Amino acid sequence: MPELPEMEHYRLRLSELIIGSPITGTEVTRDKSINISAEQFEAELVGRTIWFVERRGKHLLFHLDNGKRLVLHLMLGGTLFFGSDEERPDRTVQVTIRFATGNLYFIGLRLGYLHFMSVKEADAKLSELGPDPFDKRLTLERFKARFDKKRGALKTALVDQHVLSGIGNCYADEIAFAAKIRPDAKIPSLTDETWERVYDSMHSVLKEAISKGGYMELPLTAGDTITGGFNDHCQVYDRGGEPCFVCGTAIEQFEISSRKAFVCPVCQKEQ
């Protein structure tokens, strides 16, 4: 599932590709991917332009020039591609928005959605999200306070979108590795020093992943060599049985609350 770095990468790139370009048409092949009829969807969008693209956690919000929003959540298996019909990948497309500069394809929206909303509706839908990891108001003390009532594993809390928004399976494991703490470490056992390492690692890992285009494998455009670049830089995630880049010990794979997790048993400790 795309996480904060993937969606931030999309936000940055799409801001270059579609801002100010008139919407010339739409195509919906799966009605459940949107929240209004396909006919109304087209009527609402054609002739409009997108002023800017915002990210909230794992969501993208496309701000239309009439004050309305398109709220996107890719969920599991969702991805984006921008280009021409000839360039687009051979994948099932649920929604297409055509711009004067090219087409934006929403692919794999079997669980995800692209909803047309008012500002009030969008804010209500996302109102329960926790703070963004890059929110300047999220100081170390406020970060620690988000976990005060948690008693389970660190990873379980990190991926809870009510605690923080945007972190999922991959980056929870990568943050834990960078902080030298096991993802299954129990929250009440963590020391102040450990919390500081987790806080700093959260920022450094997410920033690096954004700069390298996240881990999505499908390119965003034809000739795109940036999207998915973080795949080759994951330290533990999806590397079960492979040697740790730091100590050479085999990375272990196990489950935490039915989620797969990866850890170096030597580099990462319980507190």
Image (cartoon, rainbow, N blue to C red):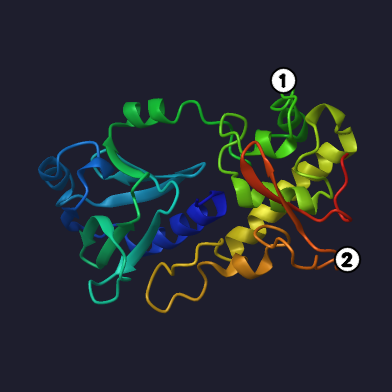
Residue nearest the observer in this picture, 127 or 3: 3
Give the left or right position of residue 89, taking residue 203 as reference: left
Count of marks overlaid on the render: 2
Q: Mark 2 or mark 1, which is nearer to you?
A: 2
Dividing the picture into quadrants, the one containing residue 94 is: bottom left
Residue 133 placement: quadrant:
top right
What residue is shown at x 47% (from left), y 45% (from top)? 55
- Which residue corresponds to mark 2? 247
Query: Real-space Cα distance between discs 2 and 1?
Result: 35 Å
Q: Residue at the location (69% across, 55% down)?
A: 205
Q: Write down the quadrant of residue 89 in the picture.
A: bottom left
In percent of the image, x 34 and y 48: which residue is there?
A: 110
Q: Nearer the viewer, residue 100 or 182?
A: 182
Work out whether 230 lies above or below 7: below
Amino acid on which the number 1 mark rests in the picture: Lys
Q: Which residue is mark 1?
A: 149
Closer to us: 217 or 44: 217
